Amino acid sequence: MRKILVVGAGQSGLQLALGLLSEDYDVTLVDPRGPDEVRAGGVMSTQCLFGPALRRERRHGLAFWDDEAPEVNGVGVRVAARRGGGVPDVDWVGRLTEPARSVDQRLKLATWLELFVQGGGRFLRHRVSRAEMEALGTEYDLVVVAAGRGGLAEIFPRDTRRFHFEEPQRRLALAYVSGGEEHPAGGVLARTVVPEAGEVFTLPTLSLNGPCHAVMVEAVPGGPLDRPLPRGATGDVVLAGLLDVMRRYAPWEYERFSSARLADPRAALYGGYVPVVREPVVRMPGGTLVWGMADSVVSNDPITAQGANMASLCADVYRRAIVDHGGRPFDEAFMRGAFDTYWRSARQVTAWSRVMLSGPPHVWELYRLAERHRPTADRFADSFSDPTGLIDWFLHPERALEYVDGIRRTTDFSSHLPTT
Ligand SMILES: Cc1cc2nc3c(=O)[nH]c(=O)nc-3n(C[C@H](O)[C@H](O)[C@H](O)COP(=O)(O)OP(=O)(O)OC[C@H]3O[C@@H](n4cnc5c(N)ncnc54)[C@H](O)[C@@H]3O)c2cc1C
């Protein structure tokens, strides 16, 4: 039986560990937190998963929240008017072909970890250091690091050919709240863009105490949405900052959440990180090869809500590669080959994130078109499920403007009313 070590019990690590366990591998999973600590800890993400990632979880018997988690049926885009005021310049909702869902990672990862242990997986509660990687690795046929962003991920050198930022591109503030009102169009991942200042997101989610909403501000550091907070700021302080930003810059969202309260005492998050692409393989000084997965090697800003979706994809690609590889040694060529398969999709998300972070003029053209042309709005929404087609019409200015011209030439706009 082949012995696999997975470091990190997050979206990708658990999904891979559970998948390999069910294929009869001898799997050891290491994470500093057990299920109880994860449940009692702070929120980590808004983790909206779209159709393909949800289907993957269903296929592997990991979708326990389909009946409880509210459906997200659309992606909304509003662009706040530069002159301010209570009416956005652009306002539409694109429909998703398959519903999306968000389940608090505290709930999901704690449950999956329990499942892993019940299924015979070995779980070690430990924070692995760089120095320990070497010794740990020698006992296993394969060592995978799925430790998320930062920390241990730094064993993988940055790949500046693929992606290069030196600083966080947004300061993130997030709270899960109860008492918010539904979006007028129903279950919507709603995104308000405040030009050059950042974004406000809201979406229905399932948290520890039942359905609620996630409210998030992505502020350009130092800009008007940025509310610098001291280390250790309480959840109520984070929420007060979020509400203040919404009141001033996204009043249509403030109306929905003005009397909202924190869903639980640990339901807020504040911080930022540098998006980065890293080398997927590193050889430790003693010769052990270590393979990086998901955020540990490709991490993007959450502006496109793709990190957990890509973590799910990466876990799937790696599991299939491991199984297909049979009894052969897991060498560097194997690791790089599987990563390249993953990168073919991940690179599109990386490119998309960069476009969304910088908001070039062609994106505003597409947003304006989508307001009058429902198929464009729906196509944008479905790109969250499958970003690979964005290269044909959204990412590149020339192709985007060709697309806009083509639609304008051939469309009777009176038949495409906005969906708000
Ligand atoms: C504010 C915010 C909002 C987001 N919203 C979305 C969204 O709507 N949709 C979406 O798809 N993605 C979203 N993401 C991104 C998504 O949450 C991550 O990309 C995803 O969870 C990454 O999965 P992962 O398995 O790589 O790492 P993680 O899920 O981060 O798991 C890493 C695990 O490794 C463990 N670990 C860390 N260091 C060590 C160590 N030294 N030893 C052992 N274990 C270790 C950690 O405890 C953790 O359990 C968001 C992220 C943020 C910050």
Image (spheres, helix red, strand yellow):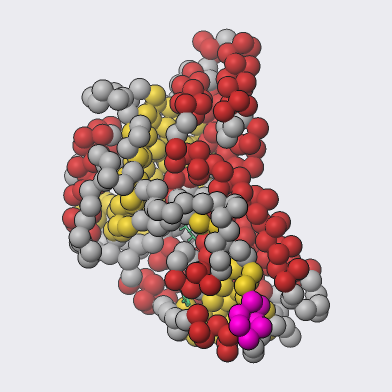
* Left or right: where 147 falls relative to 55: left
The magenta segment? 283-289
Nearest to the observer: residue 93 or residue 2: 2
* Left or right: where 234 falls relative to 197: left
Nearest to the observer: residue 403 or residue 159: 159
Which residue is painted at 35% across and 40% down in the image? 198
What is the chief secondary structure element of the magenta stretch? loop
Which residue is painted at 56% across and 43% down in the image? 351
Residue 139 vertical position relative to residue 109 in the rendered view, above or below: below
Percent position (x, y) of residue 67?
A: 48, 54
Q: In which quarter of the image is the N terminus?
A: bottom right
Percent position (x, y) of residue 190?
A: 39, 38
Residue 359 vertical position relative to residue 257 in the rendered view, above or below: above
Which residue is painted at 58% across and 85% down in the image? 134
Number of marks present in the image shown: 0
Percent position (x, y) of residue 288?
A: 65, 82
Q: Is residue 213 visible?
A: no
Percent position (x, y) of residue 319?
A: 68, 67
Q: Can residue 306 be seen in this view?
A: yes
* Left or right: where 362 falls relative to 41: right
Nearest to the observer: residue 10 or residue 73: 10
Residue 415 vertical position relative to residue 1 in the rendered view, above or below: above
Which quadrant holds residue 303?
top left
Which quadrant holds residue 310?
bottom right
Q: Quadrant of the C terminus?
A: top left
Task: Report if residue 335 lies within the magenta region.
Answer: no
Which residue is painted at 60% across and 16% down in the image? 405
